Image (cartoon, helix red, strand yellow):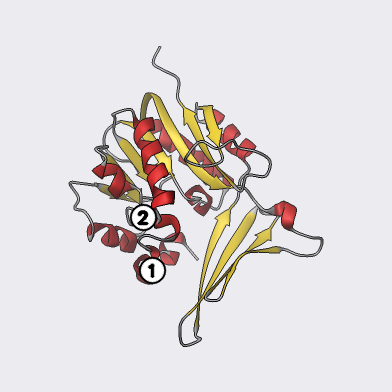
Amino acid sequence: MPQDEIWNDDAARRYDTPGTGMFAPEVLGPTVERLAALAEGGRALEFAVGTGRVAVPLAERGVPVTGIELSRPMVRRLREKVDEETVPVVVGDMATATAPGTFRLVYLVFNTISNLLEQSAQVECFRNAARHLAPGGRFVIELGVPDLRKLPPGQDGVVWSTRDDYLALDSYDVLRQRLVSHHVRVDDGGGARVFRSQHRYAWPAELDLMAQLAGFALESRHADWEGAEFTADSPSHVSVYRLPEAG
């Protein structure tokens, strides 16, 4: 199913969970603070801006933010929060769409680069970031590390959350470097709603090569937005790539 069909009106309506999950202050606060520091007073561009989870508080911190977003329902949800002047949005694919102007920071959060299902599209995403950045500008990616070490022989799925009202698992296609995230939510009446999303996983070293192809160099990599050390056991990473300065 195409990404713009996955992120439909129903998904956009259910995406925001104010105060909990990825909207929890302890998750969102460090993300916004780090991005504000990396922008160094300049303009920021968010690829796959969604409903504005990060863009809106970042704009409130005084960073001018523009977004690119493929899903019109997600943009409509964003417009319930802020107007076009506050967070302008270009509707299109983050690998190819162009936003007006030049930026000091481009960023992709919460595994969104994995929504591009081909390696070539992920490479083009890096190149698109480079086209939007001023010399010395940064491209920031937050991405999970594949859980392949947890797969026993003959099994292609990993359960990563089990609650009374929620079950989540990832099923892997290791030949095509794909995974499908399955989310099952149970309501008070015992009914269940299933949401699935497709992803192409990429290892940190693969992202580093993509970055080199686009003219970036790795500036830093941490396990989270607060700067924890990235180790072999880290479930995700925040990687900062930088273009050379002019001259």
Q: Amino acid at mark 1?
A: Arg
- Give the percent coordinates (x, y) of residue 38: 39, 31
Between residues 126 and 205, which one lies in front from this camera angle?
205
**Measured along the vertical axis of the image, is residue 149 above or below residue 6?**
above
Foreground: disc 1 or disc 2: 1
- Cβ–Cβ below 8 Å for labels 1 and 2? no
Check disc 1 and report its element: helix, strand or loop. Answer: helix
Q: Which residue is mark 1?
A: 14
177 horizontally vs 4: left or right: right
Residue lying at the far right of the rendered structure: 153
Residue 209 drawn at (x, y percent): 60, 33
Q: Which one is in front, 69 or 21?
A: 21
Residue wearing tag 2: 50
Q: Position of residue 149 (x, y in %)?
A: 74, 52
The amino acid beneath tag 2 is: Gly
Q: Residue at x 37, y 42 (%)?
A: 32
Up the image or down, 58 lies above or below 187; here it is above
Residue 84: % across, % down: 20, 50
> Residue 183: which quarter of the image?
bottom right
Relative to the observer, which residue lies in front, 244 or 169? Answer: 169
Mark carried by residue 244: none
First-in-chain label (1 vs 2): 1
Q: Residue at x 46, y 81 (%)?
A: 187
Q: Residues within 10 Å of mark 1 (few under 14, many from 20)?
A: few
Residue 132 visible in the snapshot = no
**Secondary structure type for disc 2:** loop
